[in-house]
Image: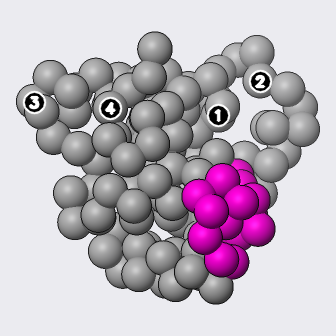
Amino acid sequence: MAGATGYLLKNTETVDVLRTVRAVQRGYVTLGPRAGGELSALLVRLAEADGTLPFPALTNREREVLRLVSLGYGNRRIAQELFISEKTVRNYVSAILPKIHVSSRLEAIVSARLAGLETADPGTGTASM
């Protein structure tokens, strides 16, 4: 297989370089924080330009849960933010994974960040400024 499976900017911190190399060795596709952020912003602009929301199969509530997951929130914090139980959060996450074609929370985070969801307003999927 030829091609890049990880991308970092040249001013990346050593700890992030090591983390990325280990992730690529395990088969993950990774982007450094700045490169990922720039790509996310681009994807949001493209989605806004054609009027589509990231992950159209998701309900607004599922998109909101995924956005909070992509920000690194645990189930307890998501439950507190949304005024729902932790079990309800777990149910949402379980429903979200197959809808976005991933098998783990980590893959969901990567997909959501690549789609620019972590920069979106809750429930709408539109970029916040």
**How far is disc 3 from disc 4 in space, using C-alphas?**
12 Å
Is residue 55 shown above or below 62?
above
Q: Which residue is mark 1?
A: 32
For label 2, the residue is 12
Residue that badge 3 annotates? 50
Tag 2, which secondary structure?
loop
Q: Magenta part of the protein: which range?
A: 72-86
Please report contact status of discs 3 and 1: CB closer than 8 Å, yes or no: no
The quadrant of the picture occupied by the N terminus is bottom left
Nearer the camera: disc 4 or disc 1: 4
Pointer 1 with pointer 2, Cβ within 8 A:
yes
* Residue 74 in the figure: left or right of residue 122: right
Report the mark closest to the observer, 2 or 3.
Answer: 3
Secondary structure found at label 4 = loop
Q: Nearer the viewer, residue 36 or 87?
A: 87
> Looking at numbered disc 2 in the image, what kind of residue is underneath it?
Thr
